[in-house]
Structures are given as structure tokens and as C-alpha cells.
Amino acid sequence: MTVQNADVAHIFEHIADILAIENANPFRIRAYRNAARTIFSFTKPVAELVSEHGDLTELPGIGKDLASKIEEIVKTGELKFLKRLEKEIPRGLSELVEIPGIGPKKAKYLYKKLNIGSLDDLVSAARQGKVSKLKGFTVQGEKKLLQNIDTFKHSDQAKRTLWIEAHDLALSLIEHLQKIPEIEQIEVAGSYRRKKTTVGDLDLLVSCSSPLKVMEQFKSYDQVQEVRAMGDTKASVVLKSNFQVDLRVVDKESFGAALLYFTGSKAHNIHLRKIALEQGYKINEYGIFKGKIKLAGSEEARIYKQLGLGYIEPELREDLGEIEAARRGKLPKLVEQKFIRGDLHAHTDASDGQNSLEDMAAEAKRLGLEYLAITEHSKRVSIAHGLDAKLLEKHIRKIDQFNKAQNGMTLLKGIEVDILVDGKLDLPDSILELLDVRVCSVHYNLNLSMEKMTERIIRAMDNRYFNILAHPTGRLINKRAPYAFDLEKIMIAARDRGCFLEINCQPDRLDLEGEHCKLAKEIGVKLAISTDAHSTNQLHNMELGVAQARRGWLENSDIINTMSLNALLRYLKR
DNA sequence: GCCGTTTTCGGCCCGACTGTTTTCAGTCG
Ligand SMILES: Nc1nc2c(ncn2[C@H]2C[C@H](O)[C@@H](COP(=O)(O)OP(=O)(O)OP(=O)(O)O)O2)c(=O)[nH]1
Ligand SMILES: [Mg+2]
Ligand SMILES: [Mg+2]
Ligand SMILES: [Zn+2]
């Protein structure tokens, strides 16, 4: 198995943790964290770059030293430098800093004083009351520590919360807070606002003339389990679900600056603040300042403007080139929900959907769409009552019948046809030919080698009736990793054959997601944003996919379902 | 450890909350 970017990133993060415990230069530590972030979000495998003798130092934050370390990791699968560090600091010690309230200094202190080298060591020391006797700890703190360790052990740290679940919670929290009439503005910031597929917590920002009231109301939310911190302007609670919510309250003159700060990302903030310094300004969550004079603060856009930058949409704020683009006036004009004219992947009760064809069409029309493709499963997916050729013919007639009635909404004759293990499609060309659009997907035999899976999909694309590759990576967030295949090769093959890839809008798929979209744009393959709705409600998920497209810098022209129906049908012909 | 149309050395974002720190370090956002 070749070394993945995520593996390299994890090694650098681990090094940063150890160096922090060793009290190394904080900027050296940051350099490792920055490099980890850069590599993690780099769209191409660094292993590939190494084998092609590419120049790793062209990546931001990667210099000579880190480049050679990456090369060593890719070539040997390990890093001598890390081995050396691990001899000095036990591996378990970096677990400690995962516990809220324990940072590198306390971890080192516990190690020095009590020889605590792992979470288990810490638990037994705390149970014996040894921790509370140390300087900087209390009996109460010791109790809380044991609780925090317990919840940590019982939660899956790898699991972040789906954006859509955070969304429901956010609505409920907002409703609760808005009972305070003095509240002027309220916004959910953080990764939620940047529309990441998953979030680590919720970050709420409020402007209000009486902050104390807001803090009290926040604390009284009935799901609050624990108050982590509670000050004059800032509070942090953990809910019964072990989900953290942060609240920041500012006055309205600072709302824009605070929104900018709280939306992040952290890397975006640091980069903006660095530019501000270079221009003789200072940015904090209260505004942008020249000396003591506040130049702006109530609106985000005015802060960007003061720096000579165009407004940067939240979805782009990852410090992945958006600030440079803004400076050069080269920001993309991102695709928007209102430009989406149709949906190319939906199911009805003819296979495993919940609603009738008529209901789905009516809802799509209500949502302002011009066309909706009905794409039932094919026969291989028997648990979903996939259609065989005969049933599909019946289905085709039904759609023709529907369209005759001129409903102000055109249904497209489609199919979600399975890509079989040998790369053949699950239905004969003679029937595929009769359709307007064919969505093709892999549902079975997921454990092929990378080469076999890539070959399988490309062979399927060789079929001239192949239009759109559905949920291309096959991952299910928090449940199933993407199957092994070469996404870049697939994108190139699709582009060269006039095929397209999907941004599947199901909340636990979001497949492709933002970073993949960026790669698609670089390669030049166009995408379809499709809900894969199995009910009328799920037709509303379009905006989740649009958000991912936006995170990937995509514009209207990168998305085929921004086209009019006639243009699209011509475009699909191969 | 990285980086550079003000620099190849000397900077590297900025502030809130907590605890016992009597003047600030640690942790976190
Ligand atoms: N300037 C500055 N801002 C920060 C720093 N850490 C966090 N922030 C800002 C930017 C973050 O997006 C925002 C919220 O912090 P979070 O820890 O909740 O991160 P975020 O929501 O981006 O990701 P998440 O999904 O919650 O892990 O606070 C920092 O060290 N400096
Ligand atoms: Mg957050
Ligand atoms: Mg947060
Ligand atoms: Zn489907």
C-alpha cells in the first residue's frame, strides 16, 4: 500500500505534539502543523510527486527539511526523526493532550512528576488522588479530569458530526437564544458556515446590547450537560450528546470582525492578520485598526476591502489560495443554488424511493426546477427492487405519458445502472439507448485492488451510454471509507470520453466533496450536482451539494445541471 | 521550520477564560 497524504499529515501532527511537549520553539511546531494541513488538503498524492521527482518545496510551508522528510516517509514508510523523538517521549503521552484542559505543558509536568505516560497511568494516578496534590491541580479538577477521560474513551474521536445534524441543532439553539429580545444579530460561524461536510462543534455568534442575558439563556438550554467556560463575552458548553457549542457575544459595531474571526478557518485568519500587519494594520475580533483608530468592524466585506481584497465567500476560507486570488481579483464567481435548473438523480416508489413519480415531479417543480431525471436502480440491486429491461420499458412509457400532459416540469427518462465487477453495465445497450440520461454507479464488489477498480470504472465509461458516475468514491461519512481507486485517472478518462462525475447530495455521502471538486476543475471534467432523492424531502438536499461545489471553487459553467434542458440533452450525447 | 518587491535573519495572529498566578502561564477559540 502506497503512503497516503493523510499518513504523512498524521506523522507531522504527531511530531508537532511531541515537540510541543518537549517545549520546542512554537513556530517550529506550527511549521509542522502547517505542513500537515497543506499535505492533507493537497489534491494529488505526494507519493506520486516524489516518484515523478517533482519539487515538494513548491508547496506552501514545505521547505528543504520537510521535503526530505516527506520523501523519506514515502520511500521507506517511516521517519527516523520521529523514531528518535518517540524514544524521548512515550507514545501514550500525546494521548493526554487530547483531553480537554490538558495541553503540552501539563502533559509534560504529569510525566515528570508522576511518570504518567498514558491515559491509563493518568486515570490510576487520579483515582489515588495523586494528581490533585500537584501544583496547578485541585481536587475538583481531578474529578473533572476523570470525567473528561471517561467521555473521551467512550466517544469515537474520529467521528465528527454530519453538517446536516449540526444544522438541526443550530436551528434549535437559535430558537432558544432568540427568546432574548435584545439580540440584534445571530449567526452560526466556524466550519458550519464554511460548509464542511462534518463539523467538530458549533460556533454561535451573537450581537446584543446585554451580553449577560445571552450567556444566561445559553447556559439554560435544556441539553447542556457541562459548562466548560463562561465569561463576559464567551462561553463554551458540552451537550448531553457530548457535542460542544461555543458562543461569542459582541456589540454590533464589531459583528463583522467577530464573524470573520469566528468563521475562520484558523489558517485563513492567521494569513489575513499577517497581511494586515504588512500593511500597517491590526485585525482582531473587534475590527481592523490603524494604531488606535478603528477603520471597520461591523461588516466582514469592509475588512477585506481595507486590505485590498475582494469579499471572500466563507466556503473558500481555508487558506488554500483564496487570499492570493482575492488580491489579484481572480476569485471565482461561485455557483449558486438559484442557477441549478434540474436534478439528474432521483428515485420513486418504482424502486426504493418513498414517493410516487407524480409527487416527486410536483415537489421538483415547487422547488423551481425545470427538469428531473427519474433514475431507478437496475436489477443487480435487488434489495432496492432494481428494474430489469422489461420494467424499465414500462417506466419509460410512464414518463412519456407524464410529459405529454405538459406539467411545466419535464421528467427525464433515466436509470441508475450498476457497474458490474467486469465493467459491464447491468442493462443491455438496446434499452439504455432509449433513455435521456444514465447515471452509473458501483454498489457491489467494493474490495477490488486499486488497479482493478479503476479499470472496471473506465471500462464502463467506454460504453457510449455512460453519462454520469454517481457517488464516485463510494464513501459513507463515519461509516465506510472510499474504495481504493485512482480518482485522478477516472476524472481524466471521464473528461476524454464526454462523461461526468456526480456531487451526490445525500448528507452522509457528499461525494464528491469540495476538495475533489477542485481537482475536477483542474483536470477539466464537469460535474452534476444531484440529490439522489429517495423522497420528496430529499429533493431539498441540493444545497448541500452546491456547498461542496462552492468549496471546490466551481462556477456555473463547471456544473452541467445549470444548463437549460435542450442544451443539456445535446451535451449528454456522445 | 519556513519565508522574503521593504528582509536570507528575525520575525512568525490575537485575545478570552481559568486558576491562585500577587502579575501570569496555560489552554483554547
Ligand atoms: N485568529 C485565530 N482564530 C482562531 C484560532 N483558533 C480558532 N479560531 C477561529 C477560527 C475558527 O474557524 C473558529 C472556530 O474554531 P473551531 O475550533 O470551532 O474550528 P472550526 O469551526 O473551524 O472547525 P471544527 O469543525 O469546529 O473543528 O475560531 C486561532 O488560533 N487564531
Ligand atoms: Mg467549530
Ligand atoms: Mg469552536
Ligand atoms: Zn441513487
Image (tube, coloured by chain):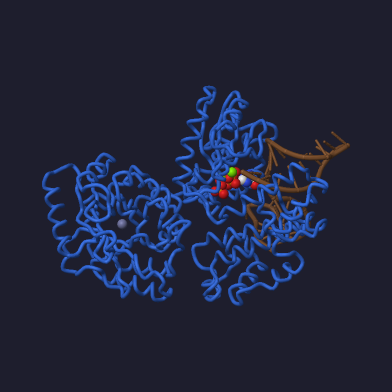
Q: What chain is the brown one?
A: B
Taking depth in this image into account, of A543 and A97 the one nearest to the observer is A97
Kindly identify the residue that appears in the image at 34 percent across and 65 percent down. A443
Q: Position of residue A476 (x, y in %)?
A: 43, 58
- Residue A40 vs A68, above or below: the answer is above
Q: Where is residue A424 in the image (x, y as percent from the top left)?
A: 27, 72
Q: Position of residue A237 (x, y in %)?
A: 60, 39
State which quadrant residue A245 falls in: top right
Q: Would residue A469 be visible to someone looking at this image? A: yes
State which quadrant residue A285 falls in: top right
Q: What chain is the blue one?
A: A
Q: Where is residue A333 in the image (x, y as percent from the top left)?
A: 41, 47
Q: Would residue A273 be visible to someone looking at this image? A: no
In the shown orientation, is residue A117 left or right of residue A327? right
- Residue A461 vs A197, above or below: the answer is below
Q: Quadrant of the C terminus of chain A?
A: bottom left
- Residue A344 vs A382, above or below: the answer is above
**Count of number-bearing discs:** 0
In the shown orientation, is residue A2 left or right of residue A436? right
Taking depth in this image into account, of A400 and A489 the one nearest to the observer is A400
Kindly identify the residue that appears in the image at 24 percent across and 56 percent down. A351
Kindly identify the residue that appears in the image at 19 percent across and 45 percent down. A358
Please identify the residue farthest to the front as the structure is shown.
A128
Taking depth in this image into account, of A27 and A141 the one nearest to the observer is A141
Q: Quadrant of ligand 3?
A: top right
